[in-house]
Image (cartoon, rainbow, N blue to C red):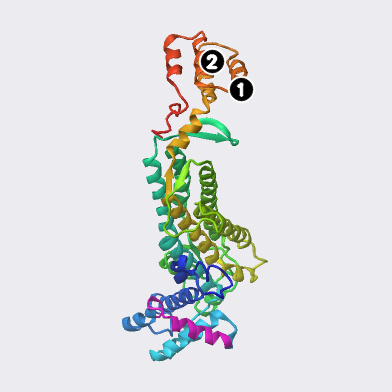
Amino acid sequence: MINALSPLDGRYAGKVKELNEFFSEAGLIRSRVAVEVEWLIFLCNELKLEDAAPLSEQEVASLRKLYTDFQEEFAEEVKDIEKTTNHDVKAVEYFLQKALKTLKREDLISYIHFACTSEDINNLSHAQMIKMGVQKVMLPKLEEVLAALKEFAEAHSAIPMMSHTHGQPATPTTVGKEFKNVGARLFRQIEQLKKAEYLGKINGASGNLNAHVVTYPDVDWPAASRKFVEGLGFTWQRYTTQIEPHDYMAEIFDIFSRVNTILLDFDRDIWAYVSRGYFKQKLVEGEVGSSTMPHKVNPIDFENSEGNLGLANAVFNHMGTKLPASRMQRDLTDSTVLRNMGVGFGYSLIGYKSALRGIGKLQVNEARLNEDLDKNWALLAEPIQMMMRRYGITDAYEQLKGLTRGAEITKDSIQEFVQGLDLPEDAKKRLLELSPSTYIGLANTL
């Protein structure tokens, strides 16, 4: 949509379309319909409340089709009702009243939304939206990123690369090990995400089941509340005000914020390596790198990923600190913020897809890597110093500092220094056999 206010609904709409099912307005309405329908079925067929005659199997199936076979026109009908009610949850209630009339079960109209506050429906709807969006879209895409990192790491595990601590030449590593570092960090966050809890409550206007107990005093309402919430696949939240406190949401958003920070860190490093020539990028037919410089092949995928992950974290960080804070028993500031969950997930998804595309284009430039290593024989000052220390040379650091700091160090000067050391011959031999490209420790194995 060329007139869309947000690029998620315009330029990038095709890249986030798989999230629409869960985080769009229609997705929210569908989830609300699902919770309202299941609550009605629970009251009539599970609790068997007096005066609430049970629904037949056919009636249950018909009601469930309202959300399992949810149609866009259902959402539009609810929005039309909302124009009159000026209340989005009440509009869903009226939509379901019409469905009961169609089934000729007007006797149950008073049990739609029974004893519920809007947040009883909303919190469970939001839990469903987040859980489905994470499990069906976000986690699979993160697994793809992890697999790409793993494949690249294993394919290039033995290729030596000079490290750059503080931006300066430092102890060598390998290309594969650096990719593995990122993958290990990402794996840990993904495992936490898989274990995340999704909490829900259904306990009335201030969390005390007040109306429930007055109308049906013989029902064990805490047990019923727990059974219903767990039946929807969520962890029961026993203690609430009018709203579920959203702490679990903050936990999940914080995990995504950490995931995004890890990948943003990766994006920046790859950008720097590309600028140093350590990586080349596969050419894409027809792609333009610069409007005026035809030679350029820019690391645009990693730049795009970095920018979108930053936007995602701005949203997630706000949600993580804002949502758990609510004035006394209820205020509405969470309501408008929660409508932007899809924004955080949408920008994250674009970031993951861009990073994947970038990884797919990377080619290791071994010649450039070796060139940097060959220019930096001073990197061997570390192993030489450690060998000197092992054999009791107390001023090892000072000797190497005098040799290497500010001086141009070559293979010949390093080997000449080693030859003059008072070391056992086997120790000298190990040092003389070293080069910057072979001084990689266990990076290949790791």
Dot 2 falls on a residue whose secondary structure is: helix
Question: Where does residue 427 sit, x and y in percent of width and height?
Answer: 44, 13
- Mark 2 closeness class: few <14, some 14–19, many ≥20 residues within 10 Å: some
Res 434 quadrant in image:
top left
Question: Where does residue 406 sit, x and y in percent of width and height?
Answer: 63, 24
Determine the main secondary structure of the stretch shown in magenta.
helix
Residue 237 visible in the picture: no
Query: What is the spatial separation of the Cα atoms under label 1 and label 2, in whole angstroms?
Result: 22 Å
Dot 1 falls on a residue whose secondary structure is: loop
Q: Is residue 401 left or right of residue 137?
A: right
Identify which amino acid the numbered label 1 is placed on.
Ala
Circle number at residue 389: 2
- Residue at the spot of label 1: 407
Question: Where does residue 42 sit, x and y in percent of width and height?
Answer: 41, 75
Question: Where does residue 180 sit, x and y in percent of width and height?
Answer: 44, 41
Quadrant holding the C terminus: top left
Name the one closer to the observer, 13 or 369: 369
Residue 423 visible in the picture: yes
Looking at the image, residue 45 lies above or below residue 439: below
Name the one closer to the observer, 428 or 210: 428
Identify which amino acid the numbered label 2 is placed on.
Arg
Q: Nearer the viewer, mark 1 or mark 2?
A: 1
The magenta-colored residue range is 66-83
What is the total number of numbered labels drawn onto the structure image? 2
